Image (spheres, rainbow, N blue to C red):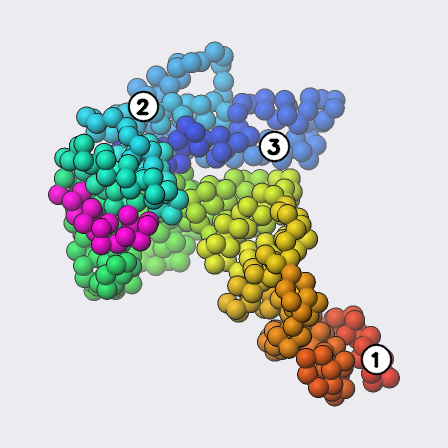
């Protein structure tokens, strides 16, 4: 692995401040004894101790894979730096890699003639050797502060391409797409290669312009030729789909490999997918898992989420809920909605960590903001119950309605319940009936039961014993006990329980 590639891996996956979050329990070899308990209080073969040792061992293997690629002179320097006692295992690797990340970044980063500014702190991409400050996802940039800070920095240093690039990021996130495009073009003129990727994305996504695959290909190709690994990765995707170029799996593989050689974690993830599917290569699950691990370590949110899913299910690796949560957390912090949803669920149910309703609510809210209906529904339940958040039935109704209107059946049912009871919203049985009907028509048994009640009692519609029986029968067939009781009452028969 080249110095530049190693720098990208370490800067994204194992940066000094992020390391404790990636491997929160791997601080030293005696961490398990210090934390879980010393014998005879806790036996070494207790489930808690074994689980801790397993997590320590897994971290050791994953960190050792990266440490093996570090140049020997840096290994030697980091072994001796600040060393107070002989250490082995994952704890020592973690500390050594913090040192390595700093030294590799210093070695690979171009000499910066302009010091770190507020523009760097507020709008840096991060995750690469060219960033001089911790990065932010574009959606997390405080545009009101970042845009003037970058305008000021660029005004004071008009030949510094990184300021034009970061100004473009801030404008892009603020949906000032025309201004962002001009800033990216200026950054490219000043030699800032990262702007090629963002400019290509504007045309690929049609942000501020008509979607233009040919223009996207043009900018991605220029960026790939300049050594911007993200451009090579995105261009590979276009070849894989035949979007703006003639479809070619061979070209896609070559570009993914080129991007991976430059430390691109997303390219590693895509290579993993191709090896798992046998797309252009012989199917090889072991190779796929290897690429997923490299992708996760290099900071790919998709790679981190894939690895989390593997640990959560025990798919190709030993099942480990604690490690799954670690990688869910890394992907969630990068804004991946699916990871935010699953991390919220882990905190909700106490899977791989202790149950913390407030944390669950926080991550459900982030996933809900990205349109995940299951997260909207679960967060609505929290507001309905006052769990992890202040009780707010009106907020619950709003969340249920968003998910219901997007076709999420459980929320359609719960919205109808709120409307029927006037909970957090004025009572409206006619609208409740509408939502019960919609959910019941999609075989939701609670909605089917309630629809039966509405027809039996004539709520929001004319009373109809026949219709009530029909809906009770559907719900009872799915095991709804109250529907079975109601059906027996109306028909005078004993319905058989579902086997």
Q: Which quadrant of the figure contains the C terminus?
A: bottom right
What's the mark number on residue 52?
A: 3
Q: Which quadrant of the figure contains the N terminus?
A: top left
Real-space Cα distance between discs 2 and 1?
Answer: 76 Å
What's the mark number on residue 479?
A: none
Q: List the residue tagged with mark 2.
A: 103
Density class for disc 1 (Cα within 10 Å; few <14, some 14-19, many ≥20) is some
Label 1 residue SS = helix
Do callouts 2 and 3 mark residues in contact (Cβ within 8 Å)?
no
Query: Mark 2 or 3, which is nearer the eye?
Result: 2
Density class for disc 3 (Cα within 10 Å; few <14, some 14-19, many ≥20) is many
Residue at 50% x, 67% y: name it: 406
- The answer to whether one can see residue 115 in this image is yes
Please provide percent x and percent y for residue 114. Answer: 21, 27
Task: Examine the image and state in which quarter residue 50 appears.
Answer: top right
Please provide percent x and percent y for residue 404. Answer: 55, 67
Please provide percent x and percent y for residue 243. Answer: 25, 64
| Foreground pick, 322 / 194 | 194
Label 2 residue SS = helix
- Relative placement, left or right, of 30 versus 217 is right
Please provide percent x and percent y for residue 57. Answer: 54, 32
Magenta extent:
171-189
Q: List the residue tagged with mark 1.
A: 488
- Relative placement, left or right, of 55 versus 113 is right
Magenta stretch encompasses residue 486 = no
| Label located before the other in sequence (1 or 3) | 3
Outermost residue toward the front in this view: 426
């Amino acid at each position: 692995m080249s110095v530049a590639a190693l720098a990208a891996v370490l800067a994204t996956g194992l940066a000094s401040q992020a390391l404790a979050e990636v491997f929160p329990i791997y601080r030293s070899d005696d961490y398990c004894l210090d934390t879980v308990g010393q014998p005879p209080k806790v036996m070494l073969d207790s489930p808690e101790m074994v689980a801790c040792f397993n997590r320590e061992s897994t971290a050791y293997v994953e960190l050792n894979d990266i440490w093996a690629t570090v140049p020997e002179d840096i290994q030697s320097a980091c072994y001796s730096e600040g060393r107070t006692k002989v250490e082995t295992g994952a704890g020592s690797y973690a500390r050594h890699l913090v040192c390595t990340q700093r030294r590799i970044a210093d070695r690979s980063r171009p000499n910066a003639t302009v010091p770190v500014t507020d523009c760097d702190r507020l709008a840096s991409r991060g995750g690469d050797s060219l960033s001089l400050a911790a990065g932010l996802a574009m959606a997390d940039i405080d545009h009101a502060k970042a845009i003037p800070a970058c305008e000021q920095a660029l005004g004071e240093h008009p030949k510094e391409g990184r300021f034009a690039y970061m100004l473009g990021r801030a404008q892009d996130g603020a949906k000032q797409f025309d201004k962002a495009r001009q800033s990216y073009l200026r950054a490219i003129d000043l030699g800032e290669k990262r702007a090629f990727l963002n400019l290509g994305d504007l045309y690929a996504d049609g942000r501020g312009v008509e979607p233009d695959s040919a223009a996207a290909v043009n900018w991605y190709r220029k960026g790939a030729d300049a050594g911007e690994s993200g451009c090579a990765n995105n261009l590979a995707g276009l070849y894989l789909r035949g979007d703006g170029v003639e479809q070619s799996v061979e070209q896609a593989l070559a570009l993914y490999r080129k991007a991976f050689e430059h430390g691109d974690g997303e390219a590693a993830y895509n290579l993993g997918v191709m090896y798992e599917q046998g797309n252009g290569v012989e199917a090889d699950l072991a190779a796929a898992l290897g690429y997923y691990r490299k992708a996760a370590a290099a900071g790919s949110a998709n790679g981190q989420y894939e690895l989390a899913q593997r640990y959560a299910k025990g798919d190709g690796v030993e099942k480990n809920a604690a490690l799954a949560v670690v990688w869910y957390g890394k992907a969630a912090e990068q804004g991946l909605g699916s990871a935010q949803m699953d991390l919220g669920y882990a905190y909700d149910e106490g899977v791989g960590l202790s149950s913390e309703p407030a944390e669950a609510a926080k991550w459900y809210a982030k996933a809900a903001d990205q349109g995940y209906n299951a997260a909207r529904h679960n967060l609505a339940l929290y507001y309905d119950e006052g769990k992890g958040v202040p009780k707010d039935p009106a907020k619950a109704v709003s969340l249920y309605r968003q998910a219901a209107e997007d076709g999420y059946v459980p929320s359609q049912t719960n919205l109808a319940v709120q409307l029927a009871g006037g909970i957090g919203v004025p009572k409206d049985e006619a609208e409740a009936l509408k939502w019960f009907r919609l959910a019941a028509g999609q075989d939701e048994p609670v909605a089917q039961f309630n629809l039966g009640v509405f027809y039996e009692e004539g709520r929001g519609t004319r009373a109809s014993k026949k219709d009530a029986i029909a809906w009770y029968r559907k719900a009872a067939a799915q095991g709804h006990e109250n529907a079975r009781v109601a059906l027996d009452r109306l028909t005078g028969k004993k319905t058989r329980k579902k086997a």
